[in-house]
Image: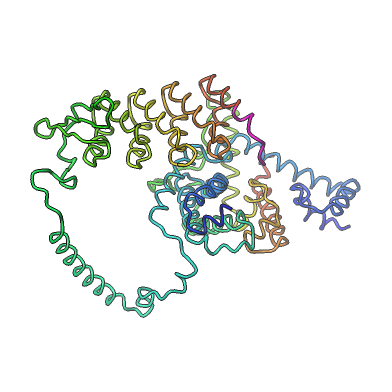
Amino acid sequence: MKCEWVRENIVLQVYGELADDARHELEQHVVRCADCAAELKAEQEFHALLESDRATSPLMQGPSPNLLAASRMRLQEGLETVKQGSFFSRLAFDPTTWLRQMRFSPALASVILVLGFAGGVGATYKIYAHSPQQPGTPTPAAFNDASVTGIESVTQAPGTNQVTIKYNTTATQEAQGSLNDQRIQQLLLYAARNNYNSGVRMDSVGLMTQNPSDTHFRDALMYALQYDTNPGVRFKALDALGPYVKDDTRVRDSLLQALVNDTNPGVRTEALRMLEPVKADGSVRGVLMTLSAKDSSQYIKSQARTLLAQLPEID
Amino acid sequence: MLIREAQRGNRAAFEELVRHYDHAVLRLALHLTGTEHDAQDVYQDAFLKAYKNIGNFRFECSFYTWIYRIVTNLCLDHLRKRNVRKEDAPVAKDSDGGEYDLLDQVPDARAGANPERDLMRRQLGARISGALEKLTPRERMVFELKHYHGLKLRTVGEILHTTEETAKNTLFRATQKLRGALADMR
């Protein structure tokens, strides 16, 4: 066996990529050849050097749970705006591509402009001709939360789903309606995000917990969980989001954010408990591993270890 | 099956697929680009591309290989562009366009515990980063997939549309270059 062959294959030996017979030959050769033995030793030392860096360098240890969660959220937003390409769509005649290929871009722009103008005029005519008029009552579309300067109070009539919200514009006003009323929903969302009074936020978040399947409410609950300054409000939002942790990955990410970043130990403990059913998820596992290694709370650390111990090993 | 569901347009199935692979994808992108900002861009582009083109996936290779092909192509593009842009390592640019030294890219999580050892660790990290930067994009990719991701060279070849033999040769060249560049560190 030539030394040249051995030297070219030492790297494969170190990475376990050599076939069994070749490995055997290489091992026999380095026993007899001092130069090749030194080359093998040098390659092994080089690997040890890289490994020592990998063990201590945070960059080499992979992305943080926060980076992963942020990337997932950004991807979900991105997915809202893209469409899947299908086999048939690739076969279909696409006039815009054709026009572009024919260098008719100016013509295409003109056509789009004319069609857009005509469509706009037509749509306006239709809206004015057919929109129902209800004099005396403001339509939901007429409600503009930019005019609301603050929410005075939020109360629910006992035993019903009727809600009364006092809010200020230039003067205090009052709105009444069911939880399904669009105007009430808008005011609740406004109250959950903008009010300086944590009691009002608590009431509005509390009402939203009655219908967390509504996507706007769920978004507001996730917002409250992450950004509300009052731990009671965050706790309430967390409880309402719990049932969705399995099916809604955005909820899962919000709970992970709360588990990692929340300043309140109670909120963190509750978030950890709620994530238990999805502990096998890659991002949850990643967070648990981080927490079990270096969390400041002994309780969280030990709970994270317990959950990890229940998981099967992965490669 | 998740892939078939995702091909039918089921977004939840696609998101579940993403969760199977995205940690490894982000890790690869983070190693190769060196900044969280660029890594997030590669992650985003890769999965949006996968979402748009999942209908073209014909089960001729594993989904793992397919998604890695997308990511490695994006990373290779990134590395090639960066090689054209950069004049001299180890200076890189952050998301705001400001320059910083790659030494600062290695966070000092244990500062204060042992300053000398920390300094040596930082120096080693910076030297390794500098040596990796000097590889060609393809050598860098093969080394990354083999050394840091532990993939078999046959899989690396499949991902990079080449043979196992070529992947072996590329790995050999990469390690020789790295050993040469880091000879005085041992």
Q: Residue at x 33, y 29 (%)?
A: A228
Up-down relation of residue A290 to residue A116 (above or below)? above
Near-viewer residue (B26 or A239):
A239
Tally of numbered discs = 0
For the stretch drawn in magenta, what is the main secondary structure?
loop
Near-viewer residue (A310 or A39):
A310
> Which colour scheme appears in the figure?
rainbow
Q: Any magenta on residue B115? A: no
Q: Residue furthest front?
A: A159
Residue A157: in sight, yes or no?
A: yes
Near-viewer residue (A314 or A33):
A314
Q: Choose top left, top right, bottom left or bottom right for residue A230.
A: top left
Q: Residue at x 59, y 53 (%)?
A: B1
Q: Estimate the x, y position of residue B49 in percent, counting from the top left.
A: 48, 58
Q: Estimate the x, y position of residue A192 in percent, counting from the top left.
A: 28, 32
Up-down relation of residue B21 to residue A292 (above or below)? below
Q: Any magenta on residue A310? A: yes
Q: Which residues are magenta?
A: A307-315
Q: Estimate the x, y position of residue A288 in percent, counting from the top left.
A: 55, 31
Q: Estimate the x, y position of residue A283 in percent, counting from the top left.
A: 53, 39
Residue B86: in sight, yes or no?
A: no
Q: Residue at x 66, y 54 (%)?
A: B174
Looking at the rendered image, the quarter that the C terminus of chain B falls into is: top right
**A11 with respect to A200 (left or right):** right
Q: Residue at x 51, y 32 (%)?
A: A275
